Image (cartoon, rainbow, N blue to C red):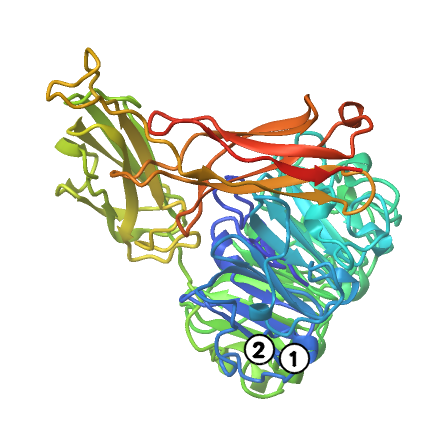
Amino acid sequence: MTVALLALVASVLTVTSSAVGESASSAVRPAQAGLLDAGEEHTCAVLADRTVRCWGRGLAGRLGYGNEVNQLSAGGGGPVNLGPGRTARAVAAGDYHTCAILDDATVRCWGFGANGRLGYGSTVNVTSPAFAPPVPLGPGRRAMAITAGSAHTCAILDDGTVRCWGAGSSGRMGLGTQASIGDDEVPGAVPPVDIGAGRRAVAIAAGDFHTCVIRDDGALVCWGFGQGGQLGHGGTADIGDDETPAAAGPVNLNGRRVRAVAGGTAHTCVVLDDGSARCWGFGGDGRLGYGGRADIPSAASAGPIALGPGRTAVGISAGEAHSCAILDTGAVRCWGFGGNGRLGYGSTDAIADEAGETPASAGPVALGAGRVAHAISLGFSHTCALLDDGTLRCWGFGGSGRLGYGNETSVGDSPSRGVAAAGPVPAGGAVPPRAADLSLRMAASVGQVALGGAAAVSVTVVNAGPDPAAGVSVALPPPAGIAYGAATATQGTFGGSVWQVGALGPGATATLQVAVSATAPGSHEIAAEVLTTSAWDPTSIPANGAAEDDRASVVFVVPQVARTGRQSTDGSKPRTRPLPRAVSVRAVRAPKRGRAKRVTVAGRLLPPRVRPAPRCAGSVRVLARAGKRTVAGRTVKLRRTRAGACTYRAVLRPAPKRVRRARLVVVTARFMGTPQMRPRASRGVRVRVR
């Protein structure tokens, strides 16, 4: 089943910080949980070098290697080609498809394309992500979490909204219809799922045919197929087919906040804020964990699952007919259908399907001497766990090589084929067992400094991860026109361009304050970036210069000294702001026929050829006019691309009352100017609107 934090089927205690999108998979290790996901017949993992490995059944290209060949060994296929220079942050495996969030927060999907589950506006299979563009999530939107069901995919975006695509039957798109999305339109072309007015999603988990979201208020909202009672409202009706999830309201959990959620085929499991694990829905084979086979359609009536005296859950995952939890000790308990050894206890017996039998009575799964689990993910008939040493263990049905051991032998189904005895899955490298999520903040005492004047800059580094980071250093080189003075730090030393921070524990912060003085006029950017760290960082790569959360900057504007008279003291003419070389504009209407509902305008500003080069900043006013009437307008900010271009983009929505009978509008863009550059307007572009 598939959930991911940035992606994972197993969901765990949620971290609601906007800086961490992996909130669906682990309370203390969300990033690692997003690195492992088990689908129906295949498994994928993100290694420490940020490459993706997939193994198991290759039908329809779900492994991403450009073919349909089964991979029996986890590392046998090598890295999945994600595109030139691209790496992965998280992976999600569905029944016949796979999706990943890449280092630039875009999404790539591959495998079986039916129903639009890949999100590309078609139903064509994609056998390698290198052959596919990013999934269109909407203008400027980035993915923070992703999950894959049997035939659908959902993602949490950077604005806290949810987009779903794929098969729409039973309302699994959450849009109040049963129409599929992504088969002839893209996800960004439809509205987000309504999870409640003003609410943001912080964690997401898809079962085979339903999806659940944890909101920023700790409430749980579920939609899709409800026949087994997996939606938790006390009935078996679908939600999202002719109403929105918000209209159905949050699942009643008796006032408790949800910190983790996992979706199976016909059941749902959660971890609540008191550390208890609870499951509801179809109860066959004891998959709910209560010592019986009865269905529980109401989440409110699902009590705590017995995990052992004094034990709580920090992670949970749901498969087709079994469930597993990671306890506060790192031990694993599994229950439900035991076929093929998927529970890991050296037998095929079901657990918790009879009165008096609970997960606590089964004891822990033997993972190996001294080993504990940091993440867990359940497929249809197999289970995989990430251990504290960065190795993987997989058990259950071995068909098609989904366990990754180079054969099709099942593991965990007999005492002679135990989980510990199987040893580490040969994945071709370690999966990061520990993480230190380092981020930087910068602040300046003032934004404008007189020539020769002084100010102060502060840099704060935060470790939001669960593990300590050693050898942390931060680069802070002085730009031309700025000189550094005295510096003080809460820890470590500053040598003029590099701050040697040292060790940072989980949740720790350190701050550096530096006095600065302006030695030349102009706009001066002071940038800081994490240079070194001993720990793996889930959201950034040290010293790569990319716009990630381990990089921050401030800008000081130092005005040119004003001079009296028409000439400067040396007799030359006073300096004036240079004029940009050009402002380009292009416009595309949609739809292509009939009345234009929106006009997408984009272009770039060519700065003047002067030294120092002007900063890419300021605003562009974009207008659409019919004759002398302004029918639409918007002011947007200039942005610098990674290639160094200074660009803008705006979406205009011409008002029919203003357009009237006009067939054409003229679109123009005017750069409004900055202290470094004069204003400049583009030429007009004609666009047919009727």
If you read the primary sequence from the N terminus, does the residue marked by circle 1 or circle 2 appear first? Answer: 1
Quarter of the image where one finds residue 49: bottom left
> Residue at label 1?
58
Instruction: Find the distance from the CA under tag 1 to the CA under tag 2.
Output: 9 Å
Residue visible at 21% across and 16% down? Answer: 562
Question: Relative to residue 237, is residue 30 drawn left or right?
Answer: left
Front-most of residues 532 and 30: 532
| Above or below 10: residue 137 | above
Front-most of residues 633 and 36: 633
Residue visible at 42% across and 62% down? Answer: 433
Amino acid type indicated by mark 2: Tyr
Circle 1: element type: loop
Quarter of the image where one finds residue 454: top left
Q: Quadrant of the C terminus?
A: top right
> Residue at label 2?
65
Residue visible at 51% across and 67% down? Answer: 83
Amino acid type indicated by mark 1: Gly
Question: Relative to residue 570, is residue 370 drawn left or right?
Answer: right
Question: Relative to residue 478, is residue 124 drawn left or right?
Answer: right
The spot of residue 56 in percent (x, y) is: 62, 79
> From where the camera sits, is residue 331 visible?
no
Label 1 close to label 2 by CB (< 8 Å): yes
